[in-house]
Image (cartoon, coloured by chain):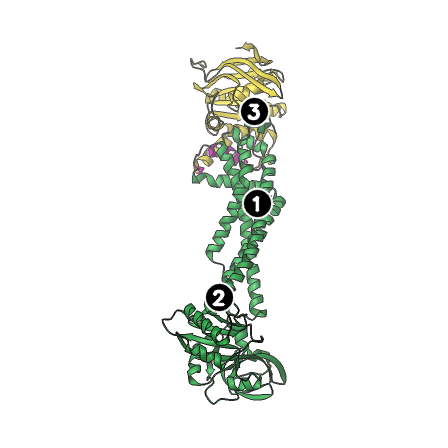
Chain colours: A green, B yellow
C-alpha cells in the first residue's frame, strides 16, 4: 500500500473510533490498565536496578562479607546479627591467613539507645576497629567514608562518626564538635559520614569497636567480618577458601555452615532473583490484562464491522479492494490499541513518579529514581499498537471478505 | 448524434444467476442476453422480482453469474476475483443508488474523493477533481457538509459527482429518483441526460417508473429473469 493513502485510511478508521466514543473508551481501558502495569513495573525496576548497582559499587567489588548464621546480608546490612552463632577473634585470625585475603576487619553492629536534645531514639551502631591497618580497609568502603571532620583513630574511646540522617531524628543540629549520648555515655562527634542514599547507612553511628564491645556486652564477638581481597585474586575463589578454612576451624560440615561468606556479586544476585520473581509475577498479571484488553478490542471490532456492513458495501461498490477494507479495519483496531497505549504510558509514568515520591520521602532512599527509557516508551507504544492490530485481524478479515451486494443490502 | 458503434461496451451472453435458498434453487436471471453500445442511454424496466436488480449487479461487476459470460469493454469479467472486480468497478463504472449510499460521516468532498483514493490517485489531484465535480453539480458551496446536513436532492447530486470521480465510461443508476420528490427527481434526471448528451457517458438505469423511460434511447423490459421486450 502506498504511503500517500495511509492518511486517508487513518481518516476512515479513526472516524469509526470517534463515532462510538464511549465504547472506544471502554475498549481502551482494557488496554491501558495492562500498559500502566507494564510501564510502572519496568520503570520502577530499572530505577531499582540502578540503586542496586550503585550500592554494589559502594561496597566495592573486591569485598567479602562474613556473617554469623545463615541469613547473609542485603546490601551490607547483616541479617544474622541476632543469631546464636558468633564470629570472634579466632575466626578473624583464620580469615586473615586465607590465601588471597588482603586484610579483614571485624565489625560490631548493635542497636543503641541514643539521646540528644532530650529525645531518645534507637539507632544502628557500628563498632569498628581503629588501628591503622583496619582503618585503611574501612576507609575504602563508601559506607564508612567521612566527608566532614575526621575518621576514628587509634586511641579514640568515646568518639563517634554520625550519618547524615542522624540529625533528622533530633531537633538540634548534630554536627562535628557536638556531643551525643549513647547508652548513657557521652560521645564527642568527630566526623560525619558521606551520604550514601541508603537510609540504614545514612542513619548509623560509628564508634570504636572496643567501646562497642563494652557498651553492648559483646566481649570479643563480631557481627560481621569485612574482608578485602588481594588485587588479582578471584573474589569467589577466595570466598570459597574462607568457607573451607572456617568450616574446619568451626568444626562444621559443608552445607551445615553456621556462618555465611558472601561476595557483593551474590548479594546483588540474591536481591535481583527476588526482584525478578516479583517482576515476573506482576508481568504475568499485566500480560493477562493485555490479553483481556485484546479480546475487548476484538469484540469491539466485530461490532464495528457489523455496524458498518453497509459502509463496507459502499466502499466495495466504488472500488475498494479486499485489502483496502482489511487495512482500514486493521488501522482502526491498531489505533484503539495505540491510543490505549499512549494513555497507559502517561498514567504509568505518573504512577511510577508517585511511587518514586513515596520511596524517596517515606522510604528514605534518596538516590532512588524511576527510570523510563525511550526504548521502554517506544516499545510499549509499538506493542500496544500491535496488540490492537493482532486483535483486530479476524474482524478485519471478516469485513474484507464481505460480498458487496449482500453488504449493500444491510 | 451517432450513438451506435459496432462494438458493445457491455455484453451479457446467456447469463444465469441462481440463488440457493437451503436446498431450493431460485433462478433470478434465466439466460439473459443483451448488449449496450457506447453512448447509449438504456433503461432496464420491470416489476419487483423481475431480476432487474440482479442484472444491475452483473453489469456493475458487483456479482458474478452462475452461468454465462459478461463482457465489459471487450473483457470477460464473469470469472474474475472480487479484488479484480473491485478495481474494474472503481475505474470503469460509476454507481448512483436509490438510497444515495454516501459515507455518512465523510463530507461531500471526502465522499467524492473516496473512489479516487481506492485508485491510488494523489491527494491534491483527488481534491482538485472532487471540488470541480461538486461545482459542476452545483454544490460548490457545500463541499464540507456531511450527508446528514444535505437535502435528498443534494445528496443525490453528491452521488452523481462521486460516480464521475474516476471518469468512468459507464454510469449505472439504480432507481435514481426513487427517494426523491418529483421536482428533485426531474432535476436529477436532467443531470443524467446532460451527462449522456454532453459528456457522452453510457448510462444504464434500472427503474420500475414508466415516466422515466422517456429519457432512454432503449428500454429493456424484464420479467421473471428474461427479456420480454426491447423498445428502441
Chain to which the residue tagged by mark 1 belongs = A
Camera-near label (1 vs 3) is: 1
Q: Earlier in the sequence, mark 1 or mark 2?
A: 2
Camera-near label (2 vs 3) is: 2
Between marks 1 and 2, how big is the CA–CA gap? 37 Å
* Secondary structure beneath label 2: helix
Residue occupied by mark 1: A294
Closer-to-camera residue (A117/A97): A97
> Residue at the location (43% across, 68% down)?
A236
Chain to which the residue tagged by mark 3 belongs = B
Residue B113 showing in the rendered view = no
Closer-to-camera residue (A188/B139): A188
Q: Do badges 1 and 3 share one subunit?
A: no
Quadrant showing the C terminus of chain A = top right
Relative to B107, is A251 above or below?
below
Magenta-span inclusion, residue A178: no
Residue occupied by mark 2: A268
* Secondary structure beneath label 3: helix
Between marks 1 and 3, how big is the CA–CA gap? 48 Å
Camera-near label (1 vs 2) is: 2
Chain to which the residue tagged by mark 2 belongs = A
Q: Where is residue B199 in the image (x, y as percent from the top left)?
A: 46, 23
Relative to A17, is A127 above or below?
below
Q: Do the residues labelled 1 and 3 touch (CB within 8 Å)?
A: no
Q: Do badges 2 and 3 share one subunit?
A: no
**Image: magenta residue range:** B99-123
Residue occupied by mark 3: B188
Closer-to-camera residue (B188/B147): B147
Amino acid at each position: 500500500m502506498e504511503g500517500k493513502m495511509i492518511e486517508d485510511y487513518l481518516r476512515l478508521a479513526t472516524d469509526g473510533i470517534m463515532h462510538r466514543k464511549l465504547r472506544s473508551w471502554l475498549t481502551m481501558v482494557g488496554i491501558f490498565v495492562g500498559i500502566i502495569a507494564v510501564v510502572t513495573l519496568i520503570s520502577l525496576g530499572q530505577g531499582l536496578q540502578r540503586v542496586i548497582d550503585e550500592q554494589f559499587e559502594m561496597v566495592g567489588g573486591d569485598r567479602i562479607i562474613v556473617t554469623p548464621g545463615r541469613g547473609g546480608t542485603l546490601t551490607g546490612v547483616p541479617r544474622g546479627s541476632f543469631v546464636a552463632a558468633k564470629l570472634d577473634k579466632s575466626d578473624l585470625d583464620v580469615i586473615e591467613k586465607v590465601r588471597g585475603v588482603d586484610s579483614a576487619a571485624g565489625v560490631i553492629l548493635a542497636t543503641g539507645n541514643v539521646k540528644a536534645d532530650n529525645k531518645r531514639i534507637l539507632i544502628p551502631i557500628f563498632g569498628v576497629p581503629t588501628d591503622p591497618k583496619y582503618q585503611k580497609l574501612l576507609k575504602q568502603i563508601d559506607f564508612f567514608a567521612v566527608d566532614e571532620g575526621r575518621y576514628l583513630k587509634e586511641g579514640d574511646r568515646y568518639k563517634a562518626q554520625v550519618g547524615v540522617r542522624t540529625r533528622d531524628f533530633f531537633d538540634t543540629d548534630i554536627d562535628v564538635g557536638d556531643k551525643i549520648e549513647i547508652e548513657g555515655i557521652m560521645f564527642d562527634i568527630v566526623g560525619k559520614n558521606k551520604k550514601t542514599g541508603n537510609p540504614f547507612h545514612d542513619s548509623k553511628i560509628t564508634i570504636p569497636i572496643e567501646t562497642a564491645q563494652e557498651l553492648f556486652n559483646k566481649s570479643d564477638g563480631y557481627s560481621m567480618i569485612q574482608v578485602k581481597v588481594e588485587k588479582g585474586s578471584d573474589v569467589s575463589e577466595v570466598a570459597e577458601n574462607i568457607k573451607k578454612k572456617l568450616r574446619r576451624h568451626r568444626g562444621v560440615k559443608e552445607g551445615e555452615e553456621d556462618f555465611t561468606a558472601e561476595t557483593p556479586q551474590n548479594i546483588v544476585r540474591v536481591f535481583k532473583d527476588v526482584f525478578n520473581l516479583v517482576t515476573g509475577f506482576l508481568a504475568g498479571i499485566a500480560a493477562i490484562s493485555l490479553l483481556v484488553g485484546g479480546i475487548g478490542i476484538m469484540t469491539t471490532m466485530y461490532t464495528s464491522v457489523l455496524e458498518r456492513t453497509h459502509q463496507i458495501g459502499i466502499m466495495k461498490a466504488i472500488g475498494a479492494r479486499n485489502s483496502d477494507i482489511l487495512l482500514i479495519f486493521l488501522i482502526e483496531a491498531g489505533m484503539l490499541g495505540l491510543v490505549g497505549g499512549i494513555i497507559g504510558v502517561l498514567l504509568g509514568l505518573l504512577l511510577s513518579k508517585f511511587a518514586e515520591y513515596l520511596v524517596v520521602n517515606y522510604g528514605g532512599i534518596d538516590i532512588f529514581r524511576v527510570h523510563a527509557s525511550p526504548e521502554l516508551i517506544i516499545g510499549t507504544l509499538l506493542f500496544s499498537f500491535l496488540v490492537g492490530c493482532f486483535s483486530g485481524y479476524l474482524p478485519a478479515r471478516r469485513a474484507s471478505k464481505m460480498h458487496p451486494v449482500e453488504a449493500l443490502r444491510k | 448524434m451517432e450513438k451506435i458503434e459496432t462494438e458493445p461496451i457491455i455484453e451479457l451472453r446467456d447469463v444465469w444467476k441462481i440463488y440457493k435458498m437451503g436446498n431450493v434453487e431460485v433462478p433470478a436471471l434465466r439466460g439473459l442476453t443483451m448488449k449496450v453500445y457506447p453512448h447509449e442511454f438504456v433503461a432496464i424496466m420491470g416489476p419487483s422480482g423481475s431480476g432487474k436488480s440482479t442484472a444491475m449487479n452483473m453489469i456493475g461487476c458487483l456479482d458474478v453469474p452462475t452461468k454465462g459470460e459478461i463482457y465489459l469493454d471487450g473483457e470477460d469479467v464473469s470469472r474474475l476475483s472480487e479484488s479484480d472486480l473491485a478495481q474494474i468497478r472503481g475505474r470503469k463504472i460509476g454507481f448512483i443508488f436509490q438510497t444515495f449510499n454516501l459515507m455518512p460521516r465523510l463530507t461531500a468532498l471526502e465522499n467524492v474523493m473516496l473512489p479516487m483514493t481506492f485508485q491510488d490517485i494523489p491527494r491534491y489531484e483527488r481534491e482538485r477533481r472532487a471540488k470541480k465535480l461538486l461545482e459542476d453539480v452545483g454544490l460548490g458551496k457545500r463541499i464540507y457538509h456531511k450527508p446528514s446536513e444535505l437535502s435528498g436532492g443534494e445528496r443525490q447530486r453528491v452521488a452523481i459527482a462521486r460516480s464521475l470521480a474516476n471518469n468512468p465510461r459507464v454510469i449505472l443508476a439504480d432507481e435514481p429518483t426513487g427517494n426523491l420528490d418529483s421536482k428533485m427527481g426531474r432535476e436529477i434526471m436532467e443531470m443524467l441526460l446532460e451527462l449522456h448528451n454532453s459528456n457522452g457517458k453510457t448510462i444504464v438505469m434500472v427503474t420500475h417508473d414508466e415516466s422515466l423511460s422517456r429519457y432512454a434511447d432503449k428500454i429493456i423490459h424484464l420479467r421473471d429473469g428474461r427479456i420480454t421486450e426491447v423498445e428502441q
